[in-house]
Image: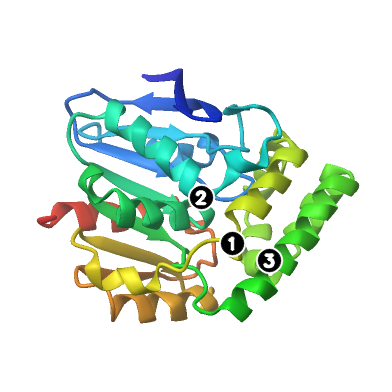
């Protein structure tokens, strides 16, 4: 049976009341799930229910999303990747006595990789779904910040349903938008707060994230990269990452786009179980 809880983590001047959904026994190997932009812990339901009972799962609402609260409200400094990562690392350290497997999608994957680089002792292994180490050059990051600012302003000015329609009209989400579960996903997204999502784009977007490319050769923990067959951008990124990270492997999921865990949860879970079945050290 799953339980829900709230954990307060202080990272002055910010406080994070993380909403967590937990399933499984505390002595079992722990899998921690980070959702993507606009998501919540609910995004992982179809994955978690397919996992064997020998695993404990923790699905958290990231700051700016779902039921997690951030204080002081609207404080932009509370939505930066270094500060959010520090708070999550503190939570993970208290949530599990032994290293965990961290699984992150898109924004959650970038955050997971940041944690793996800066807090490696917390983790047994990392799974990144459709995620990148960021952008290499200052000019690329500048261009991306402009793109993030464009979307942040739309969040602040437009009705939220209209923003969501535009967001999911991007080519990146073509396969997801035609998936039978998309309408349910869209309704879940409406539970977010647009003004907080704007902070996330400005503080944790790819344009402001420090590049992690140069850290890939230093990663000591096993790393699995999951990409969709119909997501050429992130397939190319993963192929480049696997050449740089020493304990890295790539799995391409047939027929899927950017959001593999939603489009084919069976294949997603099987890829993770195959990865965990092999020795992780």
- Residue 8, relative to residue 88: is it above or below? above
Given contact means CB atoms under 8 Å apart, are the residues at marks 2 and 3 in contact? no
Q: Quadrant of the C terminus?
A: bottom left
Q: Secondary structure at mark 1?
A: loop
Q: Are marks 1 and 2 in contact (CB under 8 Å)?
A: yes
70 with respect to 281 (left or right)? right
Element type at marker 2? Answer: helix
Q: Position of residue 121 (x, y in %)?
A: 20, 46
- Label 3 CA crowd tier, 10 Å (few <14, some 14–19, many 20+): many
Front residue of this view, candidates 217 and 188? 217
**Circle nearer the N terminus (1, 2):** 2
Q: Quadrant of residue 251?
A: bottom left
Residue 160 spot, x, y in % from top left: 83, 43
Of pointers 2 and 3, the one earlier in the residue sequence: 2
The answer to whether marks 1 and 3 mark residues whose Cβ atoms lie closer than 8 Å is: yes
| Residue designated by label 2 | 81
Query: Which numbered dot is residue 208?
Result: 1
- The front one of 4 and 256 is 4
From the viewer's perspective, tell me whether residue 273 is left or right of residue 50. left
Q: SS of the residue at dot 3?
A: helix
Q: Is residue 122 above or below residue 137?
A: above
Can residue 50 be spotted in the picture? no
Crowd tier of the residue under label 2, counting other residues whose Cα lies within 10 Å: few below 14, some 14–19, many 20 or above: many
| 55 w.r.t. 260: above or below | above
Residue at left offset 43%, top offset 44%: 85
Residue 73 coordinates in the image, percent (x, y): 69, 28
Q: How many marks?
A: 3
Q: Which mark is residue 145?
A: 3
Report the front residue among 57 and 131: 131
Indicate left or right for 16 with 156 as reference. Answer: left
How far apart in space, not on screen, are marks 1 and 3 (Cα)?
Answer: 7 Å
């Amino acid at each position: 049976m799953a339980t829900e809880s709230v954990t307060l983590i202080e990272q002055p001047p910010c406080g994070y009341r993380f909403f967590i959904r937990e399933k499984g026994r505390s002595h079992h190997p722990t899998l921690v799930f980070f959702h993507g932009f606009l998501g919540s812990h609910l995004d992982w339901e179809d994955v978690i229910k397919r996992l064997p009972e020998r695993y404990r799962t923790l699905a958290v609402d990231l700051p700016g999303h779902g039921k997690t609260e951030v204080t002081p409200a609207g404080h932009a400094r509370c939505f930066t990747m270094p500060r959010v990562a520090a708070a999550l690392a503190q939570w993970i350290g208290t949530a599990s006595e032994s290293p965990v497997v961290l699984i992150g999608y898109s924004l959650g994957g970038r955050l997971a990789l940041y944690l793996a680089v800066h807090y490696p002792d917390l983790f047994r292994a990392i799974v990144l779904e459709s995620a990148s180490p960021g952008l290499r050059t200052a000019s690329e990051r500048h261009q991306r910040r402009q793109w993030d600012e464009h979307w942040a302003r739309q969040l602040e000015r437009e009705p939220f349903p209209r923003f969501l329609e535009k967001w999911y009209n991007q080519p990146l989400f073509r396969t997801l938008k035609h998936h039978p579960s998309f309408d349910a996903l869209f309704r879940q997204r409406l539970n977010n707060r647009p003004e907080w999502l704007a902070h996330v784009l400005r503080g944790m977007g790819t344009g402001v994230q420090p590049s992690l490319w140069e850290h890939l050769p230093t990663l000591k923990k096993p790393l699995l990269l999951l990409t969709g067959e119909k997501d050429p951008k992130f397939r190319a990124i993963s192929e480049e990452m696997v050449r740089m990270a020493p304990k890295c492997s790539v799995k391409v999921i047939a027929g899927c786009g950017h959001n593999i865990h939603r489009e084919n949860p069976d294949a997603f879970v099987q890829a993770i179980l195959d990865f965990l079945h092999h020795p992780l050290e």
